[in-house]
């Protein structure tokens, strides 16, 4: 298998996390980065770990000339601009074998439609990166339960959750630039993985047809005066003026088009989880069987006393979004692999080598965007959103949530 040369757009936290994943993937070389901030540390990491002689590029067009795959790991508000530049580079002669877009595909349906149309206009294979679908625990439970599902029927209820104490960067907290709050940031993960967990064995990811969405959003922690001030001091984001939700929950109803069976996918996400750190959870129930996953159950625990805590330099070496530097800590020895980052790269590389799109393409990402917008609409209206109604689907095409508009104070409580 020929090695594919990667070019990264973006040089922040998620780009660094993907580099950790690529250390375990064959057939890829990191050739370079295009980012607004310096990428010296990422280049040094690539060279130290044998990922390639990466370099910084002045723009996307120059990078596209010298790579096989472009991976978009930059902030959400720049998605359309970056895809436009990629497409311009292809039309100018760049021979790309694939384009990767990190979740979410877009902030809303209008932007999502635009970038799907753009990439399809040049025929470049694509991959939508939703890591949780590729998690080994998710894949292992499906493999283990395959004969049970085939004998008894697929799961009828899946409950997914993602929670931590809040994002790393100021733009993530800004609802206008990011596209909302925790529902936009992490709800896309939970919508995707619960949909996938409910899907019958052997069927494509979009086999089950979404019927309706119900959701609630709330500002439970970061709207309080003390925590609002912390956000303002640390990131310059003022939730007294433009708040975003730090908690969301809801339910999606899907229909099996072959049997008519209705199944449910429940999700809960928060930026107010003050426990060890990032927790991903998934459980499902089918006729006569069940499964459960919780990433805070680790084979390794570490204890650090008060006296020793001062020596800790980087708590996130143990766990993403770790909330403490002492006490009994959960340590995940290989987070990038556990969370599915490694295997989503393997899936994308295999697809691009064969000249096709990955398991999850941008059309799938667009559908996740539609479900996310339906959840925001449900929360705003306080009612269930019917996805079988043509008028509702037409509305979602141009809908921008109040929180994304910077008008979150109209629907969220700020103390």
Image: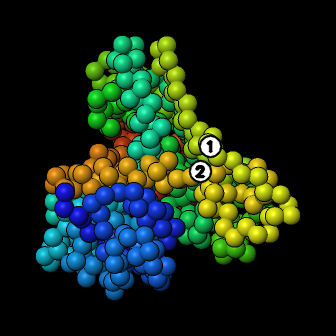
Residue 326: quarter of image: bottom right
**Marking on residue 298:** 1
Residue 29: quarter of image: bottom left
Q: Residue at x 42, y 78 (%)?
A: 43
Q: Is residue 173 above or below residue 253?
A: below
Sooner in the amino-acid sequence: mark 2 or mark 1: 1
Q: Residue at x 47, y 19 (%)?
A: 286
Residue 58: quarter of image: bottom left
**Cα separation between marks 2 and 1:** 6 Å
- State if disc 1 and disc 2 touch (CB < 8 Å): yes
Question: Label 2, on which residue?
Answer: 332
Q: Residue at x 27, y 60 (%)?
A: 27
Q: Position of residue 35 (x, y in %)?
A: 41, 79
Q: Position of residue 168 (x, y in %)?
A: 60, 66
Tell me the quarter of the image containing the N terminus.
Answer: bottom left
Packing grade of label 2 (10 A; few <14, some 14-19, many >=20) is many
Q: Residue at x 76, y 52 (%)?
A: 303
In-front residue for pair 109/154: 154
Is 184 left, or right, of 232 in this rendering? left
Viewer can see residue 47: yes
């Amino acid at each position: 298998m020929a090695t594919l040369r990667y070019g990264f757009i973006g040089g922040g936290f998620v780009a660094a996390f993907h580099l950790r994943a690529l250390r375990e993937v064959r057939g890829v070389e990191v050739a370079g980065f295009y980012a607004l901030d310096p990428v010296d540390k990422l280049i040094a990491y690539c060279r130290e770990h044998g990922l390639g002689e990466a370099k910084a590029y002045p723009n996307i067009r120059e990078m596209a000339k010298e790579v096989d795959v472009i991976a978009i790991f930059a902030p959400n508000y720049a998605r359309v601009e970056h895809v436009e530049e990629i497409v311009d580079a292809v039309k100018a002669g760049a021979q790309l074998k694939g384009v990767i877009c990190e979740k979410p595909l877009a902030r809303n349906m209008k932007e999502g439609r635009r970038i799907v149309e753009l990439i399809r206009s040049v025929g470049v294979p694509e991959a939508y990166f939703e890591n949780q679908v590729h998690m080994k625990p998710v894949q292992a439970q499906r493999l283990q339960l395959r004969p049970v599902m085939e004998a008894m029927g697929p799961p009828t209820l899946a409950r997914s959750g993602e929670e931590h104490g809040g994002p790393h960067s100021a733009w993530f907290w800004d609802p206008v630039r990011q596209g909302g709050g925790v529902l936009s940031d992490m709800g896309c993960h939970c919508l995707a993985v619960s949909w996938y967990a409910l899907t019958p064995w052997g069927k494509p990811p979009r086999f089950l047809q979404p019927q309706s969405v119900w959701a609630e959003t709330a500002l439970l922690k970061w709207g309080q005066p003390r925590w609002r001030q912390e956000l303002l001091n640390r990131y310059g984001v003022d939730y007294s003026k433009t708040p975003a939700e730090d908690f969301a929950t809801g339910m999606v109803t899907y229909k099996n088009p072959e049997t008519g069976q209705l199944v449910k996918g429940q999700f809960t996400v928060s930026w107010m989880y003050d426990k060890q750190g990032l927790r991903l959870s998934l459980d499902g129930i089918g006729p006569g069987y069940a499964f459960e996953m919780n990433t805070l159950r680790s084979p390794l625990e570490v204890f650090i006393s008060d006296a020793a805590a001062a020596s800790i330099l980087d708590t996130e070496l143990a766990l993403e979004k770790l909330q403490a530097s002492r006490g009994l800590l959960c340590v995940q020895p290989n987070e990038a692999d556990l969370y599915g980052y490694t295997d989503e790269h393997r899936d994308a590389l295999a697809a691009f080598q064969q000249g096709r799109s990955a398991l999850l393409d941008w059309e799938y990402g667009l559908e996740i965007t539609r479900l996310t917008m339906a959840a925001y609409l449900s929360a705003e209206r306080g009612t269930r959103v019917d996805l079988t109604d043509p008028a509702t689907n037409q509305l979602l095409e141009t809908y921008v949530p109040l929180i994304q508009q910077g008008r979150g104070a109209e629907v969220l409580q700020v103390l």
